[in-house]
Image (spheres, helix red, strand yellow):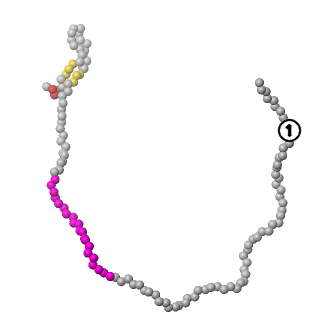
Amino acid sequence: MCEYQHQTRTRDVTVTSYEHKTEKRTVPVTSYETVYEDQEYTVCVTKPVQETIQVQHCETVAKTRVVPYTYTEYQHVTKIIKQPCTTYHLVTKTVTECVPVIVAVPCCPAPPCCSPCGPVVVPSPCCY
């Protein structure tokens, strides 16, 4: 079995802390301001100078010639032709079918004799 015991020890450690310290100094600072000075200087100025030089002058002259070419012209032509054509029209027919029908008719309580009580077959009117 292991057992742990709590022990307290004291040790010296180095702790660094900083303090803010304000000090005043005189430092050189450069600033600029506008001042006027008188100076003498030379300025280049362009002046018009006229001289005669030789140049070549080009001119465009119209020149015509005949060139053969193929010209195609299309004309609108309407032709009437006969072709077989299938058309449809609506035809309405009435179809009647005879279907045998079984109808259950309730019967009254019959006397105890042998009278039938149950479904009765009735023929439809078109089957006569």
Residue at 58% of width from left, 86% of height from top?
46
Magenta stretch: includes residue 71: yes
Determine which quarter of the picture holds residue 124.
top left
Q: Residues within 10 Å of mark 1 (few under 14, many from 20)?
A: few
Total marks placed: 1
Magenta stretch: includes residue 126: no
Pick whichever, 86 or 102, lies toward us.
86
Furthest toward the top, the residue is 112
Pick whichever, 51 or 94, lies toward us.
51
- Above-or-below relation of 53 to 100: below
Is the stretch drawn in magenta largely helix, strand or loop? loop
Helix, strand or loop at mark 1: loop
Residue 20 pos. (x, y %): 82, 54
Residue at 16% of width from left, 51% of height from top?
84
Q: Say what amino acid the circle numbered 1 marks.
A: Thr
User: What residue sits right under mark 1 in the picture?
Assistant: 10
Residue at 72% of width from left, 83% of height from top?
38
Residue 50 pos. (x, y %): 53, 90
Magenta part of the protein: which range? 63-83
